[in-house]
Amino acid sequence: MDVPVGYRNPHKQQGHQRKTQKSRGQEGPTPLFDDTSTGPPPPQGGYGAPPPNDGGVQQFPGQQYLNDPMANMAMQYGANLADQGKDVMEKQIDRFMSVSKLKYYFAVDTTYVAKKLAIVLCPFTHTEWSIRYNQQDEPIAPRYEINAPDLYIPVMGFVTYLLLAGVALGKVDRFTPEELGIQASSALVWLVIEIVAVVLTLYVMNIQSTLRTLDLIAFSGYKYVGMIVCLLAQILVGSMGYWVALLYTSVAIVFFLGRNLKLIILPESHPDHIGHGNKRRMYLLLFIAALQPIFIFWLTRHLSTAIPPKVTKDW
C-alpha cells in the first residue's frame, strides 16, 4: 500500500523536529519581544515610504514648519510687531531730535569733504560764502552746497583727535585707556558747555536768527581740524611747530566762522549795522569766533608736552 509522501517515516520526522528544537534551546531562551533598538528597516515602497526625490532636491530640516499656515501667520505677526516697535522708537527719537534733519548734516561725499577741509584750513582764498536754498526755502544738502554746515567732519575730527591724543600720551609714557577716556569726556563736556553758553547768550540778548542748534554744533566742531593740525605739528616737529600751528589755525578758524556766521547772525536786510540790534549780533559773532582758539589751546596744550630726551648710558 502506498503511503503519502507527508506521512512517510513519521518517527524520523519527529526526531528531526526534536533535534531542531534542541538546537534552538542551546542558543538561549526565546525573547518575549522583538529587538527594535536598531530601528525598523526602511520601507522599500508602498504605504509609509518617503515621497520620491524629484530632481535630486533635498528638503532641509524644518521646511515642513515653514509650509505650515500657522507658522507663516506667526512669522507675519512677529514681523508686524517688529515694524511697530521700530515706528515707536523713531517717534520717541523724533521727540528730541529729528532723524530726517540729522541725516541732512551727513549727506556728504568725498569731493565735499576734501573741499571743505581746504576751506577750513585756508579760508582766505574763498570768496563765495552764501548758502543756497531750494524752492521750499530749505538749505541744499552739503554735497551740493560747499558752504552748508555738516556734522561728518566734526565727528571724524573728534575721533581723529582722540587717536592723536593717544599717540601723544604714548610718547611720554602716559597712555592708558582711562586717560584716553578722560580726554574724550573732557572734549565732549567742553563742547556742551560752549553750546549752552551760546544758546543762553542768544536767549538773554533776545537775538532772533536762523542759526539752529545743529548748525551751531557743526560750526563749533570744525575746530577739531585745527586741533589735529596742532597735535600733528607737535608730534612731528616739536614744541615750535605746535605754537606755529596754533597761531595759524586760530586765525584761520576765526576768519572761517566770521565769514560763515556773518550771513546767518547779521542779516543784510538793514544797511545800518548799528541799529536794529545788529550791534548785539556783532558781539555774539565775535564771542563765538573768539571761543574757538581758546578751546583749541585748552584741549591740546596738556598733550603738547615736550618728549623727554633720550638718556645716553655712560660705558
Image (cartoon, grey):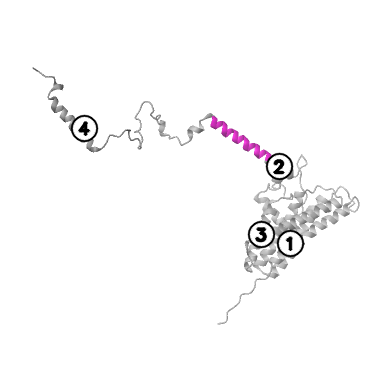
**Is 309 situated above or below 157?**
below
Specify whether residue 84 is painted magenta.
yes
Q: State how far apart marks 4 and 3 are (Cα).
A: 90 Å
Which is in the foreground here, disc 4 or disc 2? 4
Residues at marks 4 and 2 touching, judged by CB atoms closer than 8 Å = no
Q: Which residue is drawn at 70% across and 70% down?
A: 240
Instruction: Please name the amino acid that badge 4 sits on.
Output: Gln
* Mark 2 and mark 1: Cα distance apart in space: 35 Å
Q: Position of residue 259 (x, y in %)?
A: 79, 54
- Asked where in the image residue 237 lies, by quadrant, the reply is bottom right
* Magenta region, residue range: 70-88
Q: Judge whether 31 appears above or below 115 on screen.
A: above
Q: Position of residue 246 (x, y in %)?
A: 73, 65
Q: Which of marks 1 and 4 is in front?
A: 4
| Residue 145 x, y percent position in the rendering | 72, 48
- 254 on left or right of 307: right
Secondary structure under the numbered disc 3 in the rendered image: helix
Residue topped by disc 2: 92
